[in-house]
Image: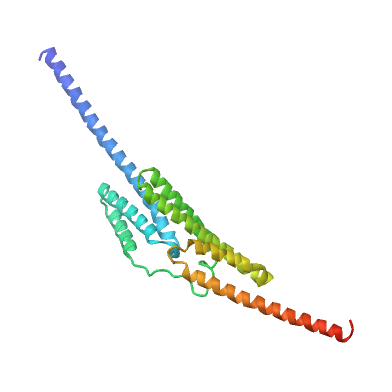
Amino acid sequence: MSPTYIAVIILLGVAVLAGIGLIAQDIENKKRERNLKLIALKTAIRRASHLFESFPPILLSSDIKNLLYKYLEVRWNAVIELENSESNRQQQTAFQAMAASTQEAILHPAGSLTIFSSSNEASRALGIIKEFAQFIADIKNKGEINAATAEHLTKEAKRLYVRVEVDFDLMNAVETEKSQGPEVVIHQYRNCFNKLQDLNFNQILDRQLYEIRTHMTQLAEEIDQRNEEKRIAEEKEQESGKKFHF
């Protein structure tokens, strides 16, 4: 076998080994890229799922619910396409079942001035609304949502934030009423009423406004009654003073 022939065989061997190495590297790169995509998708899913599950039902509008559902649906489909495992299929099915469940509209609790029963609940709601607003900003920056939809949902988040802040004001007003009486606090209720009225463009706050209005009416009657009793007491005191020449 001539030296030239041997050199050609060696070169061919080197070329084959190099080709195998490139193919192996390409496979490894694609595997790494696939794993990175799966990690990014599942991170996004966890974030959106947290919002979906934690958003107070009474504040979860159809627009917010639909956005989160569609966002999660697209990403679950992408996960299954990359890794069609039994675990992923089960998780996707669980999400679909949760999203498809029809809940009755959560109405404002009758007889209550506030949406929430405690300041802790209201604080958690504010936190979730902040997270949602940041989520919208982030997916807009990534081009995952169009600007018009992002603006609409951001405005809705701001309205919800103000609505929950009013709940805090109402809770404070209730405490002030208990400690200082109706005269001191009725203007606070009136301010809360006006703020909510400005937010009530779709009439979903009608029941809460009714509760506040009813309470203000009762307070006004109580104040009038107290003033009348005070007036009568003062007149009696004056008459008594005249009788005894005081």
Q: Residue at x 38, y 70 (%)?
A: 104
Query: Is 241 placed left or right of 166 in the picture?
Result: right
Out of 243 and 225, give the one closest to the viewer.
243
Could you say where residue 165 lies in the image, as x and y percent from the top left?
54, 59
Outermost residue on the left side: it is 1
Q: Residue at x 47, y 69 (%)?
A: 206
Q: Quadrant of the N terminus?
A: top left
Vertically, is 240 above or below 213?
below
Out of 207 and 67, give the one closest to the viewer.
207
Outermost residue on the bottom side: it is 243
Residue 112 seen from this side: no
Q: Quadrant of the C terminus?
A: bottom right
Query: Is 188 placed left or right of 12 in the picture?
Result: right
Q: Residue at x 33, y 59 (%)?
A: 95
Outermost residue on the top side: it is 3
Residue 57 seen from this side: yes
Could you say where residue 42 lies in the image, as x and y percent from the top left?
35, 49
Vertically, is 243 above or below 171?
below
Could you say where residue 174 lies in the image, as x and y percent from the top left?
61, 69
Query: Is 188 placed left or right of 99 in the picture?
Result: right
Q: Quadrant of residue 16?
A: top left
Out of 246 and 54, give the one closest to the viewer.
246
Query: Is 213 placed left or right of 47 in the picture?
Result: right
Q: Residue at x 21, y 30 (%)?
A: 20
